[in-house]
Amino acid sequence: MRRLAVALASFVAGLTAAAWAVAEAVPSATAGEEILVFLRMAPPHLRAGSAPVGGYGDDDSAAGRRRLAGRIARQEGLSLVTDWAIPLLGVDCFVLSPPRSGSAEDVAARISRSPGVAWAQPMHRYEAQARPRSPTPNDPLFPIQPVAGQWRLATLYQVSTGRGVRVAVIDSQVDPAHPDLTGQVETHRDFVRGRPVKVEAHGTGVAGVIAAKANNGIGIAGVAPDARLLALRACWQTGKGAASLCDSLALAEALHFAIEHDAEIINLSLSGPNDVLLGRLIDLAVAHGAQVVAAFDPALSRGGFPASHPGVIAVASDGVEASQEGVYTAPGHDVPTTQPGGRWGLVDGSSYAAAEVSGLLALLRQHDRARHPTLVLAASSPGAIDACASLMRASGQRETECSPRDGLAFNRR
Protein backbone atom coordinates (compact mmCIF):
# COMPACT_ATOMS: atom_id res chain seq x y z
CA MET A 1 0.00 0.00 0.00
CA ARG A 2 1.34 3.37 -0.94
CA ARG A 3 2.35 5.34 2.17
CA LEU A 4 0.43 8.58 2.35
CA ALA A 5 2.00 11.57 4.07
CA VAL A 6 -1.10 13.24 5.62
CA ALA A 7 -1.31 16.15 7.87
CA LEU A 8 1.88 14.98 50.91
CA ALA A 9 3.27 14.51 54.37
CA SER A 10 6.31 12.47 53.34
CA PHE A 11 6.87 14.71 50.36
CA VAL A 12 6.39 17.97 52.32
CA ALA A 13 8.77 16.85 55.07
CA GLY A 14 11.53 16.54 52.51
CA LEU A 15 11.00 19.89 50.79
CA THR A 16 14.36 21.63 50.68
CA ALA A 17 16.41 23.61 48.18
CA ALA A 18 17.73 20.86 46.74
CA ALA A 19 13.37 19.07 23.93
CA TRP A 20 10.42 19.17 22.77
CA ALA A 21 13.16 19.67 19.77
CA VAL A 22 14.44 16.42 18.31
CA ALA A 23 18.17 17.07 18.17
CA GLU A 24 18.80 20.08 20.38
CA ALA A 25 19.56 19.98 24.11
CA VAL A 26 17.50 22.36 26.23
CA PRO A 27 19.83 24.60 28.23
CA SER A 28 19.65 25.03 31.98
CA ALA A 29 18.45 28.29 33.48
CA THR A 30 19.63 31.53 31.89
CA ALA A 31 18.92 35.21 32.30
CA GLY A 32 15.40 36.03 31.16
CA GLU A 33 13.71 33.10 32.94
CA GLU A 34 11.16 33.75 35.66
CA ILE A 35 11.93 32.55 39.19
CA LEU A 36 9.60 30.21 41.09
CA VAL A 37 9.74 30.65 44.88
CA PHE A 38 8.08 28.07 47.14
CA LEU A 39 7.07 29.08 50.68
CA ARG A 40 6.00 26.45 53.20
CA MET A 41 2.36 26.43 54.26
CA ALA A 42 1.68 25.96 57.96
CA PRO A 43 -0.10 22.63 58.51
CA PRO A 44 -3.68 22.98 59.73
CA HIS A 45 -4.16 22.54 63.47
CA LEU A 46 -7.24 21.80 65.50
CA ARG A 47 -8.85 24.11 68.00
CA ALA A 48 -10.93 22.26 70.60
CA GLY A 49 -14.56 21.98 69.49
CA SER A 50 -13.95 23.59 66.11
CA ALA A 51 -12.76 22.97 62.58
CA PRO A 52 -9.07 23.09 61.64
CA VAL A 53 -7.62 26.62 61.72
CA GLY A 54 -4.44 28.39 60.76
CA GLY A 55 -3.71 26.05 57.85
CA TYR A 56 -3.66 26.02 54.09
CA GLY A 57 -6.74 28.19 53.67
CA ASP A 58 -6.05 30.62 56.50
CA ASP A 59 -6.18 34.18 55.13
CA ASP A 60 -3.65 35.56 57.63
CA SER A 61 -1.13 32.80 56.86
CA ALA A 62 -1.57 33.28 53.11
CA ALA A 63 -1.18 37.03 53.48
CA GLY A 64 2.01 36.53 55.48
CA ARG A 65 3.48 34.31 52.79
CA ARG A 66 2.56 36.85 50.14
CA ARG A 67 4.27 39.63 52.14
CA LEU A 68 7.38 37.45 52.45
CA ALA A 69 7.36 36.79 48.71
CA GLY A 70 7.04 40.51 48.04
CA ARG A 71 9.96 41.26 50.37
CA ILE A 72 12.13 38.66 48.61
CA ALA A 73 11.18 40.14 45.25
CA ARG A 74 12.14 43.66 46.33
CA GLN A 75 15.45 42.48 47.77
CA GLU A 76 16.33 40.88 44.43
CA GLY A 77 15.02 43.74 42.29
CA LEU A 78 12.21 41.56 40.93
CA SER A 79 8.42 41.88 40.86
CA LEU A 80 5.67 39.44 41.77
CA VAL A 81 3.92 38.10 38.65
CA THR A 82 1.41 35.59 40.04
CA ASP A 83 1.04 32.91 42.69
CA TRP A 84 -0.43 29.43 43.04
CA ALA A 85 -1.25 27.48 46.19
CA ILE A 86 -0.18 23.81 46.07
CA PRO A 87 -1.75 22.15 49.13
CA LEU A 88 -0.79 18.68 47.87
CA LEU A 89 2.86 19.68 48.38
CA GLY A 90 2.24 21.99 51.34
CA VAL A 91 3.65 25.08 49.63
CA ASP A 92 2.62 28.34 47.98
CA CYS A 93 4.33 29.01 44.65
CA PHE A 94 5.18 32.63 43.78
CA VAL A 95 6.31 33.58 40.28
CA LEU A 96 8.84 36.43 40.19
CA SER A 97 9.84 38.37 37.10
CA PRO A 98 13.09 37.45 35.31
CA PRO A 99 16.27 39.01 36.73
CA ARG A 100 17.52 41.95 34.63
CA SER A 101 21.05 40.57 34.76
CA GLY A 102 22.87 37.52 35.99
CA SER A 103 21.88 33.88 35.96
CA ALA A 104 18.37 32.87 37.00
CA GLU A 105 19.98 29.75 38.47
CA ASP A 106 22.18 31.88 40.74
CA VAL A 107 19.29 34.08 41.84
CA ALA A 108 17.16 31.03 42.64
CA ALA A 109 19.99 29.47 44.64
CA ARG A 110 20.38 32.68 46.68
CA ILE A 111 16.63 32.89 47.37
CA SER A 112 16.60 29.22 48.42
CA ARG A 113 18.78 30.12 51.40
CA SER A 114 16.27 32.69 52.69
CA PRO A 115 14.31 31.87 55.89
CA GLY A 116 10.87 30.41 55.20
CA VAL A 117 11.72 29.35 51.64
CA ALA A 118 11.28 25.65 50.88
CA TRP A 119 13.16 26.05 47.61
CA ALA A 120 13.42 28.31 44.58
CA GLN A 121 14.10 27.42 40.98
CA PRO A 122 14.08 28.95 37.52
CA MET A 123 11.04 28.52 35.28
CA HIS A 124 12.35 25.80 32.98
CA ARG A 125 11.39 25.24 29.36
CA TYR A 126 10.55 21.92 27.70
CA GLU A 127 10.36 21.09 24.00
CA ALA A 128 8.38 18.60 21.92
CA GLN A 129 10.16 15.48 20.67
CA ALA A 130 8.67 15.63 17.19
CA ARG A 131 9.46 16.55 13.61
CA PRO A 132 6.78 18.16 11.41
CA ARG A 133 5.65 16.55 8.17
CA SER A 134 3.91 18.13 5.18
CA PRO A 135 0.15 17.44 5.06
CA THR A 136 -1.37 15.39 2.23
CA PRO A 137 -4.93 14.09 1.63
CA ASN A 138 -6.32 11.72 4.30
CA ASP A 139 -7.34 8.09 3.83
CA PRO A 140 -8.17 5.19 6.18
CA LEU A 141 -4.75 4.80 7.75
CA PHE A 142 -4.95 1.92 10.17
CA PRO A 143 -3.06 -0.52 7.87
CA ILE A 144 -0.02 1.75 7.82
CA GLN A 145 0.10 2.49 11.55
CA PRO A 146 3.39 0.89 12.66
CA VAL A 147 1.89 -0.48 15.88
CA ALA A 148 -0.99 -2.06 13.96
CA GLY A 149 1.49 -4.59 12.59
CA GLN A 150 4.19 -4.70 15.24
CA TRP A 151 1.79 -4.93 18.18
CA ARG A 152 -1.08 -6.64 16.28
CA LEU A 153 -3.52 -4.04 17.52
CA ALA A 154 -6.61 -5.51 15.87
CA THR A 155 -6.03 -8.71 17.80
CA LEU A 156 -5.31 -6.91 21.07
CA TYR A 157 -8.64 -5.10 20.74
CA GLN A 158 -10.35 -8.49 21.21
CA VAL A 159 -9.01 -8.51 24.75
CA SER A 160 -8.92 -4.80 25.67
CA THR A 161 -9.67 -1.35 24.28
CA GLY A 162 -8.68 0.62 27.39
CA ARG A 163 -12.33 1.14 28.29
CA GLY A 164 -12.76 3.76 31.01
CA VAL A 165 -9.03 4.21 31.75
CA ARG A 166 -8.23 7.90 32.30
CA VAL A 167 -5.17 9.15 30.43
CA ALA A 168 -3.88 12.68 31.06
CA VAL A 169 -2.32 14.22 27.95
CA ILE A 170 -0.17 17.07 29.28
CA ASP A 171 0.73 18.78 26.06
CA SER A 172 -0.30 21.58 23.71
CA GLN A 173 -4.00 22.10 22.96
CA VAL A 174 -5.91 19.07 21.66
CA ASP A 175 -8.49 19.62 18.90
CA PRO A 176 -11.65 18.13 20.48
CA ALA A 177 -13.67 18.70 17.29
CA HIS A 178 -11.44 16.45 15.19
CA PRO A 179 -13.67 13.68 13.77
CA ASP A 180 -11.34 11.01 15.19
CA LEU A 181 -11.37 12.66 18.66
CA THR A 182 -14.97 13.85 19.16
CA GLY A 183 -16.27 12.33 22.38
CA GLN A 184 -12.84 10.99 23.36
CA VAL A 185 -11.88 13.94 25.59
CA GLU A 186 -13.47 13.90 29.03
CA THR A 187 -11.94 17.15 30.31
CA HIS A 188 -10.20 20.21 28.84
CA ARG A 189 -8.08 22.61 30.87
CA ASP A 190 -5.66 25.37 29.85
CA PHE A 191 -2.75 26.19 32.19
CA VAL A 192 -0.72 28.35 29.79
CA ARG A 193 -0.50 32.01 30.79
CA GLY A 194 -0.87 34.82 28.27
CA ARG A 195 -1.24 32.72 25.13
CA PRO A 196 -4.71 32.39 23.57
CA VAL A 197 -6.18 28.93 23.39
CA LYS A 198 -6.11 27.41 19.92
CA VAL A 199 -5.97 23.88 18.60
CA GLU A 200 -2.35 22.79 18.19
CA ALA A 201 -0.56 20.08 16.24
CA HIS A 202 1.54 18.26 18.84
CA GLY A 203 -1.15 17.78 21.48
CA THR A 204 -3.71 16.78 18.85
CA GLY A 205 -1.27 14.25 17.37
CA VAL A 206 -0.36 12.71 20.73
CA ALA A 207 -4.05 12.44 21.70
CA GLY A 208 -4.84 10.68 18.43
CA VAL A 209 -2.08 8.10 18.86
CA ILE A 210 -3.43 7.25 22.30
CA ALA A 211 -7.18 7.28 21.83
CA ALA A 212 -8.46 8.10 18.32
CA LYS A 213 -11.78 6.41 17.60
CA ALA A 214 -11.71 2.90 16.13
CA ASN A 215 -14.05 1.48 13.52
CA ASN A 216 -15.53 4.83 12.45
CA GLY A 217 -14.43 4.48 8.84
CA ILE A 218 -11.99 7.40 8.82
CA GLY A 219 -8.39 8.13 9.72
CA ILE A 220 -6.64 6.03 12.35
CA ALA A 221 -7.41 3.99 15.46
CA GLY A 222 -5.78 4.91 18.75
CA VAL A 223 -3.88 2.27 20.68
CA ALA A 224 -6.58 2.53 23.38
CA PRO A 225 -9.66 3.80 21.53
CA ASP A 226 -11.99 3.51 24.53
CA ALA A 227 -9.74 5.34 27.00
CA ARG A 228 -10.90 8.70 28.37
CA LEU A 229 -8.58 11.65 27.76
CA LEU A 230 -7.84 14.54 30.10
CA ALA A 231 -6.57 17.16 27.64
CA LEU A 232 -4.41 19.43 29.80
CA ARG A 233 -2.79 22.30 27.91
CA ALA A 234 0.58 23.11 29.48
CA CYS A 235 2.49 23.86 26.25
CA TRP A 236 2.08 26.19 23.31
CA GLN A 237 2.86 25.81 19.63
CA THR A 238 5.76 27.92 18.40
CA GLY A 239 5.41 27.58 14.62
CA LYS A 240 3.48 25.95 11.82
CA GLY A 241 4.71 22.43 12.67
CA ALA A 242 4.53 20.46 15.89
CA ALA A 243 7.29 22.40 17.67
CA SER A 244 6.05 23.37 21.12
CA LEU A 245 7.32 24.79 24.39
CA CYS A 246 6.18 24.35 27.99
CA ASP A 247 7.30 25.83 31.29
CA SER A 248 7.64 24.54 34.83
CA LEU A 249 4.57 26.26 36.24
CA ALA A 250 2.11 25.22 33.53
CA LEU A 251 3.37 21.64 33.65
CA ALA A 252 3.13 21.61 37.44
CA GLU A 253 -0.45 22.90 37.40
CA ALA A 254 -1.40 20.27 34.84
CA LEU A 255 0.26 17.50 36.86
CA HIS A 256 -1.50 18.70 40.00
CA PHE A 257 -4.85 18.60 38.15
CA ALA A 258 -4.14 15.11 36.80
CA ILE A 259 -3.36 13.81 40.29
CA GLU A 260 -6.46 15.41 41.83
CA HIS A 261 -8.64 13.95 39.05
CA ASP A 262 -7.32 10.40 39.38
CA ALA A 263 -5.51 10.05 36.06
CA GLU A 264 -4.23 6.47 35.77
CA ILE A 265 -1.76 7.22 32.97
CA ILE A 266 0.04 10.58 32.59
CA ASN A 267 1.66 11.17 29.21
CA LEU A 268 4.54 13.68 29.07
CA SER A 269 5.85 13.68 25.50
CA LEU A 270 8.53 16.24 26.31
CA SER A 271 12.06 16.63 27.56
CA GLY A 272 14.19 19.28 29.27
CA PRO A 273 16.23 20.02 32.41
CA ASN A 274 15.73 18.51 35.86
CA ASP A 275 13.09 20.33 37.87
CA VAL A 276 12.50 19.99 41.63
CA LEU A 277 8.83 20.99 41.55
CA LEU A 278 7.93 18.68 38.68
CA GLY A 279 9.95 15.85 40.23
CA ARG A 280 8.03 16.09 43.49
CA LEU A 281 4.69 16.11 41.69
CA ILE A 282 5.72 13.09 39.60
CA ASP A 283 6.67 11.27 42.83
CA LEU A 284 3.25 12.15 44.20
CA ALA A 285 1.49 10.94 41.03
CA VAL A 286 3.30 7.59 41.20
CA ALA A 287 2.48 7.30 44.92
CA HIS A 288 -1.19 7.83 44.01
CA GLY A 289 -1.03 4.91 41.57
CA ALA A 290 -0.54 6.71 38.26
CA GLN A 291 1.95 5.52 35.65
CA VAL A 292 3.95 8.40 34.16
CA VAL A 293 5.29 8.02 30.62
CA ALA A 294 7.86 10.42 29.13
CA ALA A 295 9.77 10.85 25.86
CA PHE A 296 13.47 9.98 25.88
CA ASP A 297 15.74 12.56 24.20
CA PRO A 298 19.11 11.06 23.15
CA ALA A 299 20.58 14.56 22.87
CA LEU A 300 20.25 15.12 26.63
CA SER A 301 22.08 13.43 29.49
CA ARG A 302 20.24 10.26 30.56
CA GLY A 303 17.52 11.11 28.06
CA GLY A 304 16.53 14.37 29.73
CA PHE A 305 13.86 15.04 32.34
CA PRO A 306 11.30 13.67 33.12
CA ALA A 307 12.42 10.47 31.31
CA SER A 308 15.41 10.19 33.69
CA HIS A 309 13.30 10.65 36.85
CA PRO A 310 12.87 7.58 39.09
CA GLY A 311 9.56 5.84 38.56
CA VAL A 312 8.97 7.33 35.10
CA ILE A 313 8.54 5.01 32.10
CA ALA A 314 11.03 6.34 29.55
CA VAL A 315 10.26 5.68 25.89
CA ALA A 316 12.45 6.29 22.84
CA SER A 317 11.57 6.03 19.18
CA ASP A 318 12.76 2.71 17.78
CA GLY A 319 16.12 3.02 16.09
CA VAL A 320 17.40 5.67 18.52
CA GLU A 321 21.13 5.16 18.92
CA ALA A 322 22.79 4.54 22.29
CA SER A 323 19.51 3.65 23.97
CA GLN A 324 20.31 2.90 27.59
CA GLU A 325 19.15 0.12 29.85
CA GLY A 326 15.69 0.65 31.28
CA VAL A 327 14.42 2.64 28.28
CA TYR A 328 11.57 1.14 26.27
CA THR A 329 11.27 1.61 22.52
CA ALA A 330 8.19 1.90 20.33
CA PRO A 331 7.54 2.86 16.70
CA GLY A 332 8.33 6.54 16.15
CA HIS A 333 8.73 6.97 12.39
CA ASP A 334 6.00 7.61 9.80
CA VAL A 335 3.27 7.41 12.44
CA PRO A 336 -0.12 8.54 11.04
CA THR A 337 -2.15 10.56 13.50
CA THR A 338 -4.71 13.31 13.97
CA GLN A 339 -3.91 16.95 13.18
CA PRO A 340 -5.88 20.18 13.74
CA GLY A 341 -8.69 21.08 11.38
CA GLY A 342 -9.97 17.54 10.80
CA ARG A 343 -6.76 16.44 9.09
CA TRP A 344 -4.34 13.56 9.54
CA GLY A 345 -0.57 13.57 9.05
CA LEU A 346 2.56 11.45 9.32
CA VAL A 347 4.74 12.35 12.30
CA ASP A 348 8.08 11.25 13.74
CA GLY A 349 9.70 11.31 17.16
CA SER A 350 9.83 9.88 20.66
CA SER A 351 6.77 11.98 21.54
CA TYR A 352 4.60 9.59 19.58
CA ALA A 353 6.46 6.48 20.72
CA ALA A 354 5.70 7.56 24.31
CA ALA A 355 2.05 8.10 23.38
CA GLU A 356 1.86 4.56 21.98
CA VAL A 357 3.17 3.16 25.26
CA SER A 358 0.65 5.27 27.20
CA GLY A 359 -2.08 3.73 25.05
CA LEU A 360 -0.72 0.23 25.62
CA LEU A 361 -0.67 0.81 29.39
CA ALA A 362 -4.33 1.85 29.15
CA LEU A 363 -5.09 -1.51 27.50
CA LEU A 364 -3.33 -3.30 30.36
CA ARG A 365 -4.97 -1.25 33.11
CA GLN A 366 -8.46 -2.09 31.89
CA HIS A 367 -7.69 -5.55 33.32
CA ASP A 368 -5.29 -4.59 36.10
CA ARG A 369 -6.63 -1.47 37.84
CA ALA A 370 -5.40 -2.35 41.33
CA ARG A 371 -1.66 -2.23 40.57
CA HIS A 372 0.84 -1.14 37.95
CA PRO A 373 0.75 -3.65 35.09
CA THR A 374 4.08 -4.84 33.75
CA LEU A 375 5.46 -4.25 30.26
CA VAL A 376 7.06 -7.43 28.94
CA LEU A 377 10.19 -6.99 26.83
CA ALA A 378 10.44 -8.68 23.44
CA ALA A 379 13.47 -10.67 22.39
CA SER A 380 13.71 -8.90 19.03
CA SER A 381 15.72 -5.82 20.06
CA PRO A 382 16.78 -3.97 23.25
CA GLY A 383 13.88 -2.09 24.82
CA ALA A 384 11.23 -3.40 22.40
CA ILE A 385 7.90 -4.30 24.00
CA ASP A 386 6.00 -7.56 23.52
CA ALA A 387 2.52 -6.05 23.55
CA CYS A 388 0.74 -9.39 23.38
CA ALA A 389 2.65 -10.91 26.30
CA SER A 390 2.13 -7.72 28.32
CA LEU A 391 -1.64 -7.86 27.79
CA MET A 392 -1.81 -11.59 28.46
CA ARG A 393 -0.08 -11.07 31.81
CA ALA A 394 -2.36 -8.18 32.77
CA SER A 395 -5.52 -10.04 31.77
CA GLY A 396 -4.55 -13.22 33.61
CA GLN A 397 -3.98 -15.37 30.55
CA ARG A 398 -0.86 -17.35 29.77
CA GLU A 399 1.88 -15.53 27.89
CA THR A 400 2.40 -18.68 25.81
CA GLU A 401 -0.97 -17.95 24.18
CA CYS A 402 0.71 -15.29 22.03
CA SER A 403 1.28 -16.96 18.68
CA PRO A 404 3.66 -15.17 16.29
CA ARG A 405 1.80 -16.64 13.33
CA ASP A 406 -1.86 -16.53 14.34
CA GLY A 407 -1.98 -13.74 16.92
CA LEU A 408 -3.65 -14.29 20.27
CA ALA A 409 -5.10 -17.65 21.14
CA PHE A 410 -7.71 -16.69 23.72
CA ASN A 411 -8.29 -18.74 26.81
CA ARG A 412 -11.77 -17.91 28.09
CA ARG A 413 -11.34 -19.60 31.48
Image (spheres, rainbow, N blue to C red):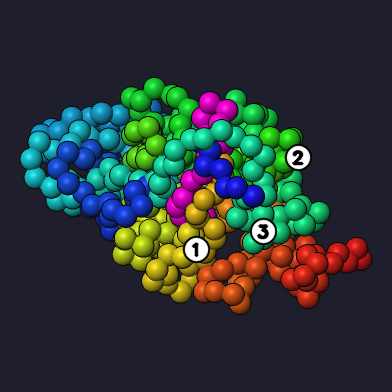
Look at the image and give the residue range highlighted in magenta.
338-353
The first of marks 1 and 3 along the sequence is 3
Q: Can you identify the residue that label 1 sits on?
A: 318
Which of these two is toward me, 82 or 266?
A: 266
Q: Position of residue 210 (x, y in %)?
A: 60, 46
Q: Which amino acid does the dot numbered 3 rest on?
A: Gly
Q: Secondary structure at mark 3?
A: helix
Measured Cα–Cα span from mark 1 to mark 2: 27 Å
Q: Secondary structure at mark 1?
A: loop
State yes or no: discs 1 and 2 in contact (Cβ < 8 Å): no
The first of marks 1 and 2 along the sequence is 2
Location of residue 246 (image quadrant): top left
Q: Which amino acid does the dot numbered 1 rest on?
A: Asp
Res. 215 mark? 2
Measured Cα–Cα span from mark 2 to mark 3: 17 Å
Which of these two is toward me, 225 or 3?
A: 3
